[in-house]
Image: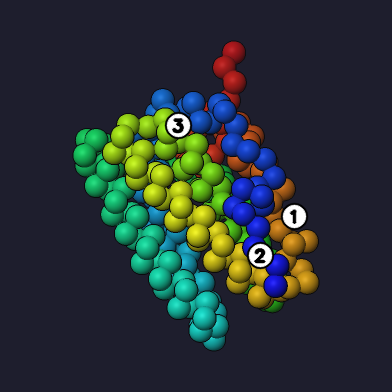
Amino acid sequence: MNAPPAADTILRAPTPAAWVEAAVAHWPELLIDHANCEKKAASTALALMFAYPEDRELCVALARLAREELRHFEQVLRAMRAADVSFTRQRPGRYAQQLRALTRTADPGRKLDLLLVGALIEARSAERFSLLAPRLPAPLARLYADLGSCEARHFELYVGFARAAAADEWRRRLEVLAAREAQLATTPEGVLRFHSGPPPLSG
């Protein structure tokens, strides 16, 4: 069996520098969205467990992943408390919603698509953690460096199950989903989110 690709190799475009600069300048606001992302990651894993209970290996792996994502949520909350950042409600960004809109509605295609979308989200997270960690205050920098390694491992988990689910199709389907992911991560967006595009050009 061929080795799984590295997280950055499935991303069809790097995060724009403008997003990184905006995130560094507004990291307290980004922390709020980051906390929400960790909750969503846990809920995504749980939803897949309920959708495919017959896949025992997948369910066991996702149960562990969900627990880890919830621990990350707790870590982000502690970071927010230490930085005196209050939790506030936010409008959802377009990224995950529009990416998941591409998933097929019937199996076996739907299972493959959900696994690949999970892989892409985790891969983008790993990339952005690695970009932000060297630029943030020390306690948060250490957390983001650690989380980057975790997200890369989660990406590998999702890709591994995608390959097992559809060995002959997963790469072709990944190309479709990855192209859209790249558009969403690089096209200017009016709100700053952990997975958003860069802020719109002023003037």
* Residue 113 appearing in the image: no
Instruction: Give the mark nearest the N terminus, 3 or 1.
Output: 3
According to the picture, the residue beneath numbered tag 3 turns out to be: 23
Instruction: Give the mark nearest the N terminus, 2 or 1.
Output: 2
Callout 2 amino acid: Ala
Q: Quadrant of the N terminus?
A: bottom right
Dot in front, 2 or 1: 2
- Outermost residue toward the top? 203
Q: CA distance from mark 3 to mark 1?
A: 28 Å
Compare residues 112 and 97 and report the one nearer the observer.
112
Residue appearing at x 66%, y 75% in the figure: 164
Callout 3 amino acid: Ala
* Residue 145 appearing in the image: yes
Residue appearing at x 32%, y 59% in the figure: 71
Instruction: Give the mark nearest the N terminus, 3 or 2.
Output: 2
According to the picture, the residue beneath numbered tag 1 turns out to be: 175
According to the picture, the residue beneath numbered tag 2 turns out to be: 3
Is 58 located above or below residue 71 in the figure? below
